[in-house]
Amino acid sequence: MTALIMTKGREPNAAGNDSRNEGMDAQSTAAGTGPSGAPPRAPSHAERARTLARAAQFGSLATMARDPEGYPYASLVALATDARGRAVLFLSRLAEHTQNLLARPEASVLLLESPIVGEKLLEKGRVTLLGPCTAVPPEEAPECRALFLAAHPDAATYADFPDFTHYRIEPRSLRYVGGFGRMSWVDAAAYARAEPDPLAEFAPRILGHMNDDHAESILAYARKLAGIGDATDAQMTAVDRYGIEMAVTTPAGERRVRLAFDAEIVTREEARKALIEMAGRAEEG
């Protein structure tokens, strides 16, 4: 059994998605792996956006140009994100984008999933935060300074220059794109409440280990747990606190499927145990 997740409309849904136009998550997913057989739980777009933003250290800042007036001006900036997912910048008053912000605070910043290299760049996740970008109040500057320097230690060489000031984007809305077929406008309040995925920093190593050393188990997941009996190959493409995603090759073409863990997990060891348990069930099936 498969389920097609799709959101339409204008209001935020339970997952924290706010689809203005054609926002959707059109990833085909397999039935859940738990005893209830429920549809597989997946991170909301708000959670995916928070996870991506937490890891981002650079972005493309778009400000409203003064000359030519009214045109978006994009520039590369270093950044960090705070506990609410807000982008914290450290900008020189001499920079063109800072002069633009002093005239008009409306801005957006595009953050890309890491790593951003490879042939399939458009399949990588990205999120655009839109909102006013203004100087941080003096009483909050020390906290922002510590946050920014933790992400960019080399900034210590110019941290005390008098023309540099911390700025912060307060998201009014967000556009999340997680690759082809996964996109929506995300409600800013839902984004602020969402928690980044605790497995994010371990995910690349988990995926590399599973795809390199346990390819037979992944294929068994696809055939037995996802019910794709004619699968000829399978690659694990994502892992998060709620489950895994796979790209499954069949004679009819590639299918994208998701399998849920029996319970939410938060550590690398819990992920290892959950994957072993899934392999055991696949062998029994």
Image (tube, grey):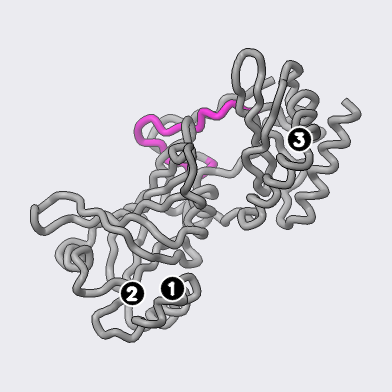
**Magenta range:** 14-29
**Amino acid found under the numbered disc labelled 2:** His
Q: Of residues 196 and 179, which is closer to you in this image?
A: 179
Which numbered circle lies on residue 166? 2
Q: Residue furthest left?
A: 68
Q: Is residue 71 above or below residue 283?
A: below
Mark 1 = which residue?
148
Residues at marks 1 and 3, CA–CA distance in whole angstroms: 40 Å
Mark found first going from the N terminus, 1 or 3: 1
Residues at marks 2 and 1, CA–CA distance in whole angstroms: 9 Å
Query: Does dot 3 land on a helix, a strand or a loop?
Result: helix
Residue at 47%, 53% (x, y): give it. Answer: 191
Residue at 28%, 78% (x, y): give it. Answer: 164
Q: Quadrant where the N terminus lies?
A: top right
Residues at marks 2 and 3, CA–CA distance in whole angstroms: 47 Å
Tell me where residue 166 sits by quadrant: bottom left
Label 2 with label 1: CB-CB less than 8 Å: yes
Percent coordinates x, y for residue 69 in the rendering: 9, 53
Mark found first going from the N terminus, 2 or 1: 1
Q: Of residues 198 and 215, which is closer to you in this image?
A: 215
Percent coordinates x, y for residue 201 in the rendering: 62, 57
Q: Residue furthest top?
A: 252
- Most common SS among magenta residues: loop
